[in-house]
Image (cartoon, rainbow, N blue to C red):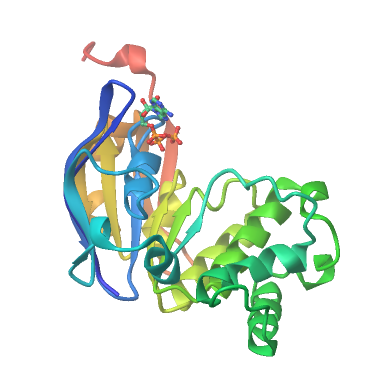
Amino acid sequence: MRLDIENVSVTRGARTVVHGVTTAVGTGRVLGLLGPNGSGKSSLLRACFRGLRPSGGRVLLDGADLAGMSRRDIARNIAVMAQEPPDELGLTVAESVLLGRTPHHRGFAGDTTEDRDLAEHAMKLTGITHLAHRHVHALSGGEKQRVLLARAITQEANVLLLDEPTNHLDLSYRFELMHLVAGLGVTVVMALHELDLALGHCDRVLVLDGGHAVADGPPGEVLVPSLLRDVFHVDAARTVHPRTGRDHLLLSGAARSEEGTS
Ligand SMILES: Nc1ncnc2c1ncn2[C@@H]1O[C@H](COP(=O)(O)OP(=O)(O)OP(=O)(O)O)[C@@H](O)[C@H]1O
């Protein structure tokens, strides 16, 4: 399913925090939203599932305006892995993951064998089968994040939106998550701080600065030293991994106080 973001602005409180952003992500592709703290990544991501209504522009799912879709249709098509896990009210991991099937239920119909199989499969993919009977509220941050991903996978949506999904994850699981998400074959938009992960795993990146789109394209073309200095205030060098041959970023802090002195 294709997702189009057309001239979207988002206002929070009295401030416009996203200014007329346009981009698109094709079926099965991965778009990374990058930018410093407060640049508008989460706000734009929320506009993509109507968690926030754009104050201007529109978001289209395969050409259909999200503004005209029912909540249920949005939930059937779009799964969201938010930054903050919701209060799980004493649910176990297995129960929480099964909630992903809710948009597919009619009325008060209970879970089917197929629902439970899908949830089990998602728990296996995300490595949380051993936690199935634990209470979500007693898990670590990274374990909770895996539960949220398993629920999103169980939802079988066409579009997956992730807000800083690697936040609490240990090093090896960060890579696993990126492989897993890219391999699902669904359309993905993720807000990310880790530029090297974006370089290696996104098909396209959109860079926000102060709510404005300042670059949009393949990560290898966008994540160049001049942009990383101007937007992220880091010194960057690109290098090739001697074993894999893949491109990587070497980053070090560039003192902001040096700006304008040379
Ligand atoms: N509930 C809110 N009410 C008013 N302003 C808000 C609210 N939430 C966020 N903002 C403001 O909107 C702007 C964009 O925030 P947003 O969370 O979209 O940025 P972000 O790029 O996701 O940041 P981060 O990397 O820190 O998560 C910021 O200036 C922030 O202070």
Residue ranking furthest to the front: 107
* Quarter of the view holding residue 186: bottom left
* Quarter of the view holding residue 60: bottom left
- Could you tell me which quadrant the C terminus lies in? top left
**Residue 161's spot in the image, x, y percent?**
43, 58
* Quarter of the view holding residue 70: bottom left
Q: Is residue 144 left or right of residue 3?
A: right
Picture residue at 23% right of the left edge, 51% below the top: 222
Task: Classify the position of ligand 1 by quadrant: top left, top right, bottom left or bottom right.
Answer: top left
**Residue 59's spot in the image, x, y percent?**
23, 56
Q: Is residue 210 above or below residue 184?
A: above
Front-most of 212 and 259? 212
Picture residue at 59% right of the left edge, 63% below the top: 149
Q: Is residue 55 left or right of residue 192?
A: left
**Residue 85's spot in the image, x, y percent?**
63, 47
Front-most of 218 and 6? 6
Q: Is residue 128 above or below residue 23?
A: below
- Could you tell me which quadrant the N terminus lies in? bottom left
Q: Is residue 45 left or right of residue 179?
A: left
